[in-house]
Amino acid sequence: MVDKYTIKFDHVEKSYQNNTVIPDLNLTIPAGERLILLGPSGCGKSTTLRMIAGLEEVTGGELRIGGRRVNEIPSGERNIAMVFQNYALYPHMSVEENIVYALRVHKMNREEMQRRLETALEILNLKPYVKRKPRELSGGQRQRVALARALVKQSPYLLLDEPLSNLDAQLRGQARKELVKIHELYHQTFIYVTHDQVEAMTVGQRIALINQGDLQMVDTPYRIYNRPANVFTARFIGSPATNILDAQWDGRALYILGQKTSLPDCWSRLIARNGEEAVYLGIRPEHIRLQAGVCENALCGQIRYIEDYGSKRGVYVAVGDTEVVCICDCPPCGAGETVSFYLDSDHIHLFSRSTEKSLGYPEEVSDDQVLQPLILERHDSVPA
Amino acid sequence: MDHSTKLQKTSGYSGLKRGPLGQPRRLEQGFRLRVRELRAYLLLAPAAAIFTVFMFYPLAYTVYLSFFDWNMTRPVKKFVGLANYISIFTDQSFGKIMGNTLLYIVLLLVMNFVAPYIFSFVLSFVVKKGKSFFKSAIFLPSVISLVVGTMIFVWLLNPLSGPAASLAKALGLSVPIWSNTQGLVIVVISVITSWKIFGYNFIVVLAGVSSVPLEVVEAARVDKIPTWRIFWNIVVPMSSSTGIYVLILSIVTGMQQVFTPINMVTRGGPDNASTNLVYAVYDQAFGFFKTGTASAYAILIMILFAFLLFLEFKYVEKGVYYEN
Amino acid sequence: MKTKHRPATSRQFGWYIPLILLAAAAIVPIVFALLYSFKPLQSIFGNSNLLTSGFTLENYRKIAQQLPILQITLNTVAVAVLVTVFKLLTSILAAYAFAFMRFRGKTVLYFVMISTIFIPFTVTMIPNYITISKLSLFDNIVGIALPQLADASGIFLLRQTMRSIPKSLLEIAEMDNIGRMRSLRDIILPICRPSIVATGIIFFINSWNEYVWPTLILRKKEHYTLSLAMQLFSSSEAGTEFTSIMAMAVISMLIPVVLYLIFQRYIMSTFASSGIKG
């Protein structure tokens, strides 16, 4: 489908002299979507955004906006609005002048300009500040002015480059909601860069996770969290990070960190299909249950230390050389003592050791199905 | 006709879709780049023209003139090779001129580099009150003409009727006739020059010194490090980039500014006692109309300054910072 | 607690003495010049002191009689305005190119231009004298102004300021399709205004105080600038009439000092940034 406002990266490459930042990017952003570009700093997410904006040259492949190749189209002719991380407000202009400056330069008629200004001021609660200079505004107000300036352009695309990272935590939550509200009002294509996963999860309809210039996964927040496509995605999303444990498959049983466990059949079939002996098993800290002492049929290790999060506690358990993090309401025993733990088999993730890609999920463990918790059992008997 | 070329062009583009940058794009980009560059050069042109005509061409011409015997009015210049250089090196006053130049440099460095450094440390980290008053007061002479400054000092230090003389008389002393005293004349001329240039250097050093984070100095204070050590071991290294810039600047501007009091008060005298390289150029050119000799002296200065320029590039432009 | 504090404060007081002496050394000569410019000549010879010797405008009257002082002041203003306007223009254009444009040879050109700070006046003096004579600009304010219409330190200072403007400001203007010259006019120049004002004031004052070059170029009294008039007045007309010389000094430094007092804050911060490279 060639939508009028689709943005399409087709084998896009970006390099500076001989330093390649983005080797080969393929991504389609349908009109009206809220897409988040998420990744660690320096991963190329801002570069991607700036290529759409026309502030960075595309050095290979093709970037299409609304079906038109834009590689050679100067930034100013692309009709794209943007909010910068530092807001980029003109320090010598008042709020009002900042918002309408570009419209005025392009000689928009007075009434239309006034109408757009009024609407933007209204939506963003900026009425009382129209005459102020940026330096007389708080961080949150500045961010809203930058947004207002982007809105009056009435572009079908709104790019946001870490727009909330200069705000304090409380304001950020509020601003997030405001952004979603604005999107629902105008339905422009939102492309939003952030390194904050909470922001990504709450604002995004889809998240494109990028690492070292490579697209790791593009999907809904739910699927990114619950169905990570690879080890990087599983590790990057969630805090504390997903435990990625070494596991060996001997054809019948799975040895997690050298300890034999029996796996529900559906998972075994997946591993068998993969054909590799060595795999990674991913499990989120909140999907591990702890019990004091050495238990039959369970992995065990020693508690190293306990972090208190207030409502929950993070327990760091040493199993051999590996550290496993679990989250629970109340640890069964103190540091230095031995615990057993059970992995919730509905919430495990299996990855190939060689490609680090997900082995997929059995049909029995489908996305939206509520499943009974199963417990991985540990067998003391040595495999034959 | 039109249509077909258009079609060809389109297919040309689509054929290059995934390959390396295609020929037509390259050309178009190259063209745009050249237009942009042209605009940059156009913006630089006025400054570049002035610099070329009144800085670089004269520099080259001075080098050229230093090999000729000429008096600026005669229609023919006589090529004399290195004779001008030989004549200045063998001139009996050459040693004196170089010695004086060195003495000026040392005095100017002490007064306009070392002193501002210490005072800006004091103002940044030692005292707490009246900072802006001191800054304004100390900078004030920088905006006043050195001609004015020289005249005021000539009177203030006049051995017969100046205020310094009255003060000295009240204390039973007398002010020496400094403009006629070997050695002392250089000191006084350096003081007059420093009166003007101290403030500027001070403000620049101050900016460098106060960019040293207060926490670093406070951390040292907590550890009971003596003040002079805080200055020498912490502040000086951390502001070294600005420091070297001012060090070079105090020589470059000092050497040139010192010309004014020399020309106004002593005209190099008594018996060349206050002449330096800069004044020698002027004296040879407009006193004796010996353009060649003057140019040879000028080239000596240029060599000295080129060395300083080299230091500037080596240590300042590249950044001596410990920060970053 | 209190006993611990005391030594620190007294040490701090100790440091005020050299600072006060330094400030006095800077200001006292100016104050003396101002005071004595209103004193009768005999006050500096007799035993009368500052308080008892009375007040007179005689010194200023003498200057007005002996020199076309109004004309000289106007000449100085004319040269300073000419130099300031053109220096600012050439500096702004060059600084803009160096700060925001990409072109071949940029670094080299920048360093070549900046290195002119290190070309001493004496090295260019003779050829420039010949050039000006060839252009028959002797005894002409254009002849004084012409060689100084570009200034490396101005380019340096303004480039520094322009580079401190966040790039995103220009990028948003670019995305809004605002032309380069328009953004120079509407965005960059207004933001740089404090630096431009300060640099302009500095140019003005430096030109006002210019001495060596006018000495070489100017001949007739009615073409003199203040610095030149001051020197000739003090060495010939007035001789040892120090009170008249002080009056002349006051006239010469009046405008620079007033400008400084008005624009002090701008000037200081702009000068301060000149030593911090980046």
Image (cartoon, coloured by chain):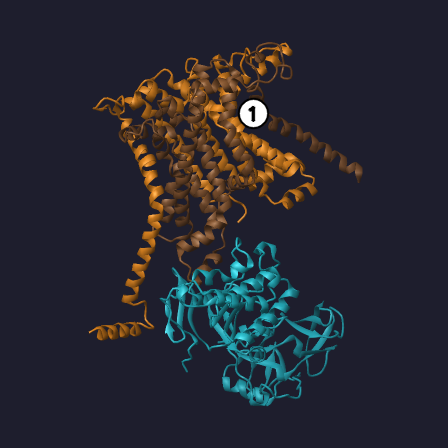
Chain colours: A cyan, B orange, C brown
Q: Quadrant of the C terminus of chain A?
A: bottom right
Judging from the image, what secondary structure is the residue with disc 1 in? Answer: helix
Count the labels in the image.
1
Spot occupied by residue B15 in the image (x, y as percentages of width and height): 29, 74
Tell whether B15 sits left or right of B198: left
Q: Residue visible at 32% across and 41% down?
A: B49
Tell whether C227 sits left or right of A328: left
Can residue A88 be seen here? no
Location of mark 1 (residue): C30
Would you place residue B33 above or below residue A180 in this image? above
Can residue B314 be seen here? yes
Spot occupied by residue A78 in the image (x, y as percentages of width and height): 41, 68
Spot occupied by residue B195 in the image (x, y as percentages of width and height): 53, 26
In the image, A243 versus C91, the foreground residue is C91
In the image, B225 versus A267, the foreground residue is B225
Spot occupied by residue A11 in the image (x, y as percentages of width and height): 39, 73
Mark 1 is surrounded, within 10 Å at the Cα level, by few (under 14), some (14 to 19) or many (20 or more) other residues, namely many
Would you place residue B69 above or below residue B31 in this image? above
Q: Amino acid at mark 1?
A: Ile
Quarter-wise, where is residue A105 in the image? bottom left
Chain where mark 1 sits: C
In the image, C263 versus A306, the foreground residue is C263
Tell whether C25 sits left or right of B183: right
Tell whether A197 sits left or right of B25: right
Quarter-wise, where is residue A62 in the image? bottom left
Would you place residue B318 above or below residue A271 in this image? above
In the image, B183 versus A83, the foreground residue is A83
Q: Quadrant of the N terminus of chain A?
A: bottom left
